[in-house]
Image (cartoon, helix red, strand yellow):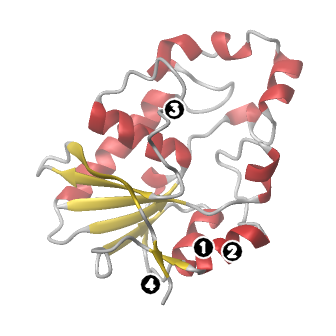
Amino acid sequence: MRLALIRHGPTAWNAEGRVQGSVDTPLSDEGRAKMSGLRPPAGFEAARPFCSPKLRARETAALLGLENPTIDERLAEQNWGHWEGLTRAEMLARDGEDAFERAGGRRKLEFRPPGGESTGEVHARLRDFLTAVAGGETDAVAVTHMGVLRAAYVLATGWDMSASMPSDLDLTAALVLSLAPDGTPKIAQLNAPLRRRA
């Protein structure tokens, strides 16, 4: 079966470069206007809908025309703890230029923002979600977050996260995975365009 992962629309904090994480921010007016004109990728018109519990994701799902999506905590963004609401510059100014290194930035899956959730924990809950969804009889579509899309890319490709997020992963498009019966993902389509609303 296939799963299309879609990132929520833009928020004011996105525009300001602020980490949202577990904070329940809404879409901006620009974000609402953008997402209201779009629909899931072709081939997912009748897919089972899932959604992160965060407001920005739920608003996006509604604007995309996804009716009564199953809200799943495993699709929530990584919790960034004490760094939520801050820009990268503000984090470093407050906690020191080596703040990311001390949080485990070089250890990839062990990276944990102060008071937050590790990258490995995000991967584990996404893996659990993929296993559950793979047991369904029809394709699925899920509205989620950048951190979850990044985790899905890692699980599907084996990317070691040693550099910045791959440039070929377009967060304004859908990441379509094919799931084995045990939930093991492979990329079925990278950057599947969202359809324009008719």
Residue labelled with disc 4:
67
- The first of marks 3 and 2 along the sequence is 2
Instruction: Give the residue type that dot 2 points to.
Output: Arg
Earlier along the polypeptide chain: callout 1 or callout 3? Answer: 1
Q: From the image, tell me which residue sits under label 3.
A: 165
Q: Are marks 1 and 3 in contact (CB under 8 Å)?
A: no
How many residues crowd around disc 3 within 10 Å: few (fewer than 14), some, or many (20 or more)?
Answer: few
Tell me: residue 87, above or below residue 52: above
On screen, residue 142 above or below 170: below
The Cα atoms of the two marked residues, 1 and 3, are separated by: 23 Å
Quote the CA–CA distance across marks 2 and 4. 17 Å
Instruction: Report which residue position mark 1 lands on.
Output: 35
Distance of mark 2 from mark 1, alpha carbons? 5 Å
Image coordinates for residue 76, horizontal then vertical, percent: 52, 52
Horizontally, is 18 left or right of 176 in the view? right
Say which of 173 and 67 sits in front: 173
Q: Position of residue 178 (x, y in %)?
A: 21, 53
- Three-letter amino acid code of the residue under disc 3: Met
Q: Regarding mark 3 in the picture, which secondary structure is present there?
A: loop
Tell whether 123 sits left or right of 144: left
Q: Are marks 2 and 1 in contact (CB under 8 Å)?
A: yes
Q: Position of residue 109 (x, y in %)?
A: 45, 22
Which is closer to the viewer, label 4 or label 3? Answer: 3
Reading the image, the residue beneath label 2 is 32
Q: With 96 as the anchor, is 109 left or right in this view?
A: left
Give the SS element for disc 2: helix
Q: Give the amino acid type for the residue marked by disc 4 in the picture.
A: Glu
Q: CA distance from mark 3 to mark 2?
A: 26 Å
